[in-house]
Image (tube, rainbow, N blue to C red):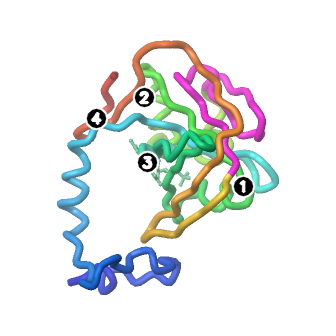
Amino acid sequence: MSWIDQRPDDAMDGAFTAVGPDSVRTIEAAPFREAMSRLGAAVHVITTAGSGGKAGATATAACSVTDAPPMLLMCLNRRSQTYPIVMENGVFCVNTLGAGEAEIADLFAGRTGVSGSDRFNVGEWTTLVTGSPVLATAVVAFDCRIVEVRSVGSHNVFFGAVEAVRLGPQGPALCYHERAYKPL
Ligand SMILES: Cc1cc2nc3c(=O)[nH]c(=O)nc-3n(C[C@H](O)[C@H](O)[C@H](O)COP(=O)(O)O)c2cc1C
């Protein structure tokens, strides 16, 4: 079965059109998730604030795109509460958690039942340029303005131009590997 039979989605925007002449036939989601669990990834809290409100979600899907101009990308599920608020605000901050911040990761992943702006009651928060919440104890924070958005399957890929960074306390970052938090 091809991906299009499993999950038709008019927001896909042609993102899965094969570049070559042959059609796309993916593996199933479960073995893909299992395979991805073998990759270690830094854990971030993606935050946003503005006319759409204040929100944040835990994410590992963030990485550098280019330094000319400084740009990163992050991926958010369109079903998350945070997604429409990021779209409305047009800005976000990627806060990379320190090794001791698993509690904040769980909080912003919705694992403790706290939702919306109440999540910001834990931790020390400040702002840089865009007004998105910046976690003072994060190892680093990238304050971004959205310059491009692509819908790909269940997620949207947000490209953010980096307008400011804040280097936090030096030390190990929080990583997610084989479905567990680990310091690196
Ligand atoms: C370690 C970890 C990594 C995650 N990475 C992502 C991610 O990259 N993108 C995403 O959309 N959700 C990711 N999630 C799930 C979101 O944190 C979760 O769906 C959260 O509840 C979204 O919050 P919201 O619905 O309140 O906005 C991750 C969760 C965990 C625990």
- Was residue 2 drawn as part of the magenta stretch in this picture? no
Give the alpha-carbon distance from disc 1 to disc 3, as whole Å: 18 Å
Give the alpha-carbon distance from disc 4 to disc 1, as whole Å: 31 Å
Give the alpha-carbon distance from disc 4 to disc 3, as whole Å: 16 Å
Which region is colored magenta?
A: 123-145
Q: List the residue tagged with mark 1.
A: 90
Numbered disc 1: secondary structure:
loop
Residue 27's spot in the image, x, y percent? Answer: 19, 69
Question: Label 2 is placed on what type of residue?
Answer: Ala
- Disc 2 versus disc 1: nearer the observer: 1
- Was residue 138 drawn as part of the magenta stretch in this picture? yes
Question: Label 4 is placed on what type of residue?
Answer: Ala
**Quadrant into which the N terminus falls:** bottom left
- Disc 3 versus disc 2: nearer the observer: 3
Beta carbon at label 3 within 8 Å of ligand 1: yes
Q: Earlier in the sequence, mark 4 or mark 1?
A: 1
Q: List the residue tagged with mark 4.
A: 180
Q: List the residue tagged with mark 3.
A: 61
